[in-house]
Structure formats: C-alpha cells, structure tokens
Image (cartoon, grey):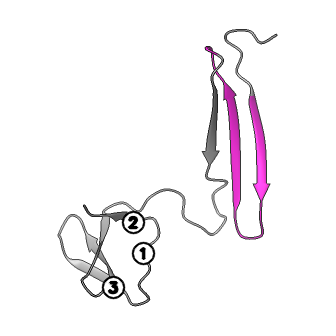
Amino acid sequence: MIHADYILNCVLVCSDMFYQIALYIVIRQNREVTIMAGNGKSGDNRRHGAVKGRSQTQTGSGHWVKRDTSTGRFMDVKSDGTKFKGVRKEK
C-alpha cells in the first residue's frame, strides 16, 4: 500500500563505455508514474545542458553555421555537414 504523500525514487543506472544515463521513477500523489532522465555526474567529459548565447543555421550548401545571438556575427562553420551538439537551431 502506497500512501498519498509517499514518493518512491528508484534509480536505474544504465552505463555504457562512453555515456551514463540515470532514470528516476517517481510515484506522485495521484499515482501517476513519471520517468525523468538525469544528466549523470559532472566531470564525465561531456556537455550537460544546452549551449547558451549561440544558435545555428544551415547554409544553402548544406553546412551548419554557428552564430552569436547577442551580436549576430557568424562564429564557426562545420565542413562535414553535421550539426553542432547542444546548440539550438534558428527557425
């Protein structure tokens, strides 16, 4: 029997050689089950969260260009045709 205010946090850790994902299962007051993904721990040599102050857009030739949102200046172009990781796309 689960009381109405009881919160159950079960940590399921799926680890791989290159990344680690932590899943938390939370049972809330209305008995709805929510699964939340965590970023793992800091210092694991990867990005946590989005890059702030940057956006990216695709050129006509298919290359992705990174732009500074405060000045509007183009900063970097990727030559391999893949997107920048963690940088939001312009609409």
Tell me the residue at 77%/70% (across/down): 17
Local secondary structure at mark 3: strand
Q: Residues within 10 Å of mark 1 (few under 14, many from 20)?
A: some
**Amino acid type at mark 3:** Val
**Amino acid type at mark 1:** Lys
**Amino acid type at mark 2:** Val
**Outermost residue, bottom direction?**
79
* Alpha-carbon span between mark 2 and mark 3: 13 Å
In the shown orientation, is residue 84 left or right of residue 46?
A: left
Give the residues in magenta: 9-30
Tell me the residue at 69%/44% (across/down): 23
- Quadrant in the rendering for residue 89: bottom left
User: Quadrant of the image for the N terminus?
Assistant: top right
Front residue of 87/45: it is: 87
In the shown orientation, is residue 32 left or right of residue 20?
A: left
**Outermost residue, right direction?**
1
Q: Residues within 10 Å of mark 3 (few under 14, many from 20)?
A: some
Earlier in the chain: of badge 2 and badge 3, it is 3
Check contact, mark 2 vs mark 3: CB within 8 A: no
Where is residue 55 shown, x and y percent of the image?
30, 66
Tell me the residue at 31%/62% (across/down): 53
Q: Which residue is under mark 2? A: 87
Numbered circle sitting on residue 77: 3
Numbered circle sitting on residue 83: 1
Question: Of tags 1 and 3, which is closer to the observer?
Answer: 1
Numbered circle sitting on residue 13: none
Check contact, mark 1 vs mark 2: CB within 8 A: yes
Up/down of 46 relative to 30, above or below = below
- Quadrant in the rendering for residue 41: bottom right
Local secondary structure at mark 1: loop
Up/down of 2 relative to 36, above or below = above
